[in-house]
Image (tube, rainbow, N blue to C red):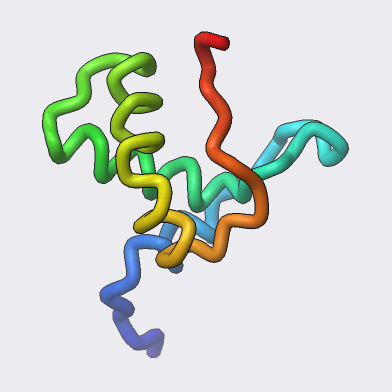
Amino acid sequence: MTTPTASIIHHFSKIKDHRVNRQKKHQLKDIFFITLCAVICGADDWVVIETFGNAKKDWFTKQLNLKYELLGITS
């Protein structure tokens, strides 16, 4: 029997990432987590998700141990 976990990030880490390895700067689970947080806070498109992620980048960097700067999708 498996034990339930309360970690959303742990749940996202089970999703297979089909992106090309050399182009991965952020883990897929981190992208999902940032996106989920943004949507919960009212983001309804990728530009708003980007704006939210950049506004909270210090917090996300600490929580997710991000190695790279959050990059814009519109730049």
| Position in image of residue 37 (x %, y %) | 25, 44
- Residue at 35% x, 57% y is 59
- Residue at 36% x, 15% y is 47
| Position in image of residue 28 (x %, y %) | 57, 45
Residue nearest the observer in this picture, 69 or 25: 69
| Position in image of residue 54 (x %, y %) | 40, 35
- Is residue 14 rendered to the left or right of residue 43? right
Q: From this viewpoint, which residue is outermost toward the right?
A: 22
- Is residue 26 rendered to the left or right of residue 8? right
- Residue at 72% x, 33% y is 19
Question: Which quarter of the figure has residue 36?
Answer: top left
| Position in image of residue 5 (x %, y %) | 32, 78
Quarter of the image with the N terminus in it: bottom left
Quarter of the image with the C terminus in it: top right
Q: From this viewpoint, which residue is outermost toward the top?
A: 74
- Is residue 62 rendered to the left or right of residue 68? left
Question: Which quarter of the figure has residue 4?
Answer: bottom left
Residue nearest the observer in this picture, 29 or 70: 70
- Residue at 55% x, 65% y is 65
Question: Which quarter of the figure has residue 51?
Answer: top left
Q: Is residue 1 above or below residue 17?
A: below
